[in-house]
Image (cartoon, grey):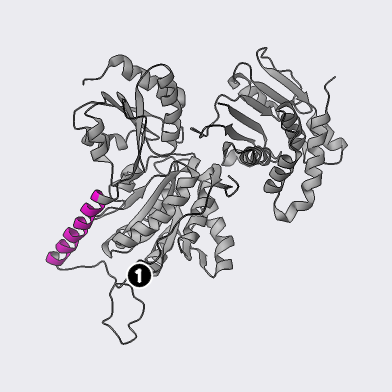
Amino acid sequence: MADKVLMKGNEAIAEAAIIAGCRHYFGYPITPQTEIAAYMAKRMPKIGGVFLQAESEIAAINMVYGVSSTGKRVMTSSSSPGISLKGEGLSYLAGADLPALVINVQRGGPGLGGIQPSQSDYFQATKGGAHGDFHMIVLAPASVQEMAELTVKGFELADKYRMTSMILADGTMGQMMEPVSLDIPVEKSIEKPWAVTGTKMQRKHNIINSLFLKPEILEKTNYDRYQRYETIKQNEVRYEDYLMEDAEICIVAFGIAARVSKNAINEARKKGIKAGMIRPITLWPFPEKQIAKAAEKAKTFISVELSMGQMIEDIKLAVNGKADVTLCNRTGGMIPSPEQVLAAIEAAAEKGGNN
Amino acid sequence: MKTTQYLIAGFGGQGILFAGKFLAYKGLIDGANVSWLPSYGPEMRGGTASCSVIISDIPVGSPIVSKPDVLIAMNLPSLDRYEDSVVPGGTIYVDSTLIDRKVKRADVNVFYIPATQMASDNNIPTLANMIIMGKVLKENGEFDDKEAVDAALKKVISARHIDMLETNLSAMILGKNYKEN
């Protein structure tokens, strides 16, 4: 483990962004993600990059739009209320088919809410994030190592599909330290013939725009975009199976909730209960096929979430009535304990499900 | 298979997070899986600070320590709040300068170290945390490998303050050599 260093999740994201070739960061401080900005403020000037603390979250996301138009890898980060402020910009990025990486280290909401960890921005992240027909690729790390790796992956996917990737983390993932290896392979050479880089009188000029006043044309851009989304659904679903071979009770959880659930599953197994977990790593695209397949065997699905129950709707869609789907949750900055999850598993085991 | 869950708690400013970081790095150097999770937010600024550290042979599941094997209590509110959460057979280290009561539990091992007084007597008033760390490492049988202790200290002391390395080490030795009456 000599090559591993202890880093906070937030710092790992910042360093991984630099490794991925990001030289432009715009942000505005907000707990619990401020270490990202602090790290960028220290590092960017030393490597010829740009760190800019904008006057607001709205300004920062529009700076991201500008840099992305030139074909450069660019990032902003915030936490829940700050992400809401960025909503307009997220929609404009989608409308102009611009790649970007946006980090949301979630805290409890709604409103200013609190500063403790939460996963209650699931709907916002996976169902679009702002007005109009669009999606973001949503990546949910469950370790500091994944905070780094998915940051790199997020840039690559954003470039490949010309859209925003969002890292949907939470306060725990941002604040905790774990050993991390930063030896992460990076695909940097993604061609961007659409970028505004100066024509040098050699080509027609490129236009970056999200305004289409002719509905026929706007409709076509939306259909084209959704065709790309289908490709993403086919090719980019990521998830982890944990003890699913013989599982009768299937937990679905991401991020910190998945970490807590693992403890509970291990305890349940000691008691002879066949529990397992599907941990979505991409929340959009959601591993719906994998969950549908698991529903052929599992009797009960338990959605473990730090929210009032948001991902559970996608689980129900995927399960499609083939098994029970229940919720095990805390909200407002509280985190379910392994004991609470174990109790939910035991209750499911007792009930037996409808399979 | 061995997993040790530490909860370190005290006032903001006592070096709670620093002590936790030292433990985590020591674990990393020893080849273990580790996690470190601080309390963050308003309680950091003057109120109570706490930090969860897990050191394990197997990958760490939840990084949140709710039932510590080892509690390091550096002020009274921390002992009041967390004493009951320690697992039976666990260990509690108490800074007995700042905590004037005894541990009520009979099913745990307890070490009372007047760390704040010792730090003040030895003119290292900010290092009560590392005095207790010295005692923890000694009880863990981890002080025998002095190279690993040195290496972990080097990791947590920033390059800017590397002149503090010897001072930290001497604080730890004070803790290591402390004998209860």
Spot occupied by residue A324 in the image (x, y as percentages of width and height): 24, 25
- What residue is shown at x 25% (from left), y 19% (from top)? A353
Image coordinates for residue B53, horizontal then vertical, percent = 60, 34
At 37% from the left and 59% from the top, the residue drawn is A156
Residue B111's x, y, as percent? 74, 22
Instruction: Classify B23 as above or below A101.
Output: above
A287, A108: nearer the viewer: A287
Describe residue A271's horizontal placement relative to residue B54 as left or right. left
> Would you say residue A82 is visible in this rendering?
no
State the predominant SS element of the stretch in magenta.
helix
Q: Is residue B128 visible?
A: yes
Horizontal and vertical percent position of residue B109: 69, 18
Q: Is residue B76 above or below residue A104?
A: above
Q: Amino acid at mark 1?
A: Ser
- Tag 1 subunit: A
Q: Determine whether A353 is above or below A208 in the image.
A: above
Magenta segment includes A151: no
- Name the quarter where the N terminus of chain A is drawn: top right
Element type at marker 1?
helix
Residue of label 1: A69
- Viewer-nearest residue: B46 or A246: A246
In this picture, which residue range is highlighted in magenta?
A216-234
